[in-house]
Image (cartoon, rainbow, N blue to C red):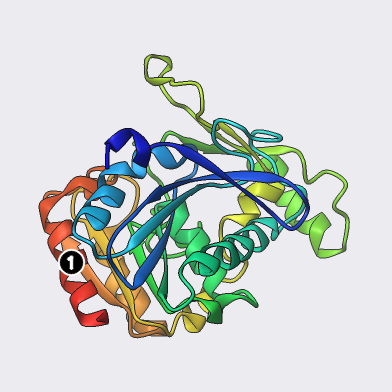
Amino acid sequence: MEQSVYRELKPFQARNGSTLYYRYYPAESNHVIILLHGICEDSKYLKPMAEFISREHLAHVYTLDLRGYGQYPERRGDVDYIGQIENDLMDLIEFVKHDHPESTLIMAGHSAGGGTAIRFAGSKYGTHVDAYLLFAPFVHPDAPTTPKSNPNSRTKVYLSRLVPLILLNKVGVTLFNHWHVLSVNKPKEQYHGTETLHLSYRLLMSRIPEKYEDALRALQQPTLVLIGDKDEDFDHSQYEPLFKRYNRAEVKIINGADHDGLLEHGDAYAEVKNWFAQLT
């Protein structure tokens, strides 16, 4: 099959009637992975890992452009309400299960995609997933894996908006949840036209667990966490003690891998392949 077919966007319909888009990487396997992208990019950049998993016939791979992202967003950087992302993911799971009814379902994600997967694990839908695969996951802003200060970060959080909105939401006021609370400072020479550089409060809150400790406790399925020792965004040394505190996830440090390079690193590929062998 030509690689251009792998990159083709395919539609499916969410419960509210919206059309969302995914990329499909086929395999001869009884496993299926839904692989989620990071905070500002769509699913295109996940191609190296998705193609590796597909090429090795480890699993069929679906990479979704989450609501508010990608080439055809209804409203870039926004959703209708907090929690809509996990509803969309459950709709995709049902869609995928129609074509792969007997397959093992794995939820995977890179960076904020990993945080979204962790949030899903702690949601009412978490038991619909058989295993989790997390690449340098953004667990939560308050988790020990997130440095308190990071001069390398391109992400700016507007605390003057975020903190009041958190307090307002606690008393049921959601009128201002469309406000942007996060921006990504991406160099203009790297623009490709489908990045999402400004996130509303309700989209950001839909991509991280409300209480990360509870979500990690809920993560009792077989789970592999990969993090590079050169990661620029997160503290790789904190992943194993954090996950060990709440669940039995296997944490592997990939020497020489940075945040995005993890998805193309030979040692990461080897760990993924070994983990799948244990699932079989």
Q: State the residue at coordinates (65%, 78%).
A: 124
Question: Where is the C terminus found, in terms of image quarters?
Answer: bottom left
Image x and y of residue 229, in percent: 18, 55
Vertical side of 164 occupied by 193: above or below: above
Along the viewing direction, whichever of 265 and 90 lies nearer the viewer: 90
Q: At 28% from the left edge and 46% from the top edge, which residue is drawn?
A: 259
Front-lying residue, 54 or 167:
54
Classify 69 as above or below 169.
above
Q: Which residue is painted at 69% across and 54% down in the image?
A: 14
Judge left or right: residue 219 versus residue 52.
right
Q: Is mark 1 on a helix, strand or loop?
A: helix
Q: Are there few (<14), some (14-19), or many (20+) residues within 10 Å of tag 1? A: some
Query: Looking at the image, can residue 267 be seen?
Result: yes
Residue 249, x across and y down, in percent: 32, 79
Pointer 1 residue: 273
Q: Is residue 94 above or below residue 256?
A: below
Residue 36 horizontal/vertical position (percent): 45, 53
Is residue 162 in sight in this rendering?
no
Q: In this view, does 38 lie to the left or right of 17?
A: left
Amino acid type assigned to the residue bearing label 1 in the image: Lys
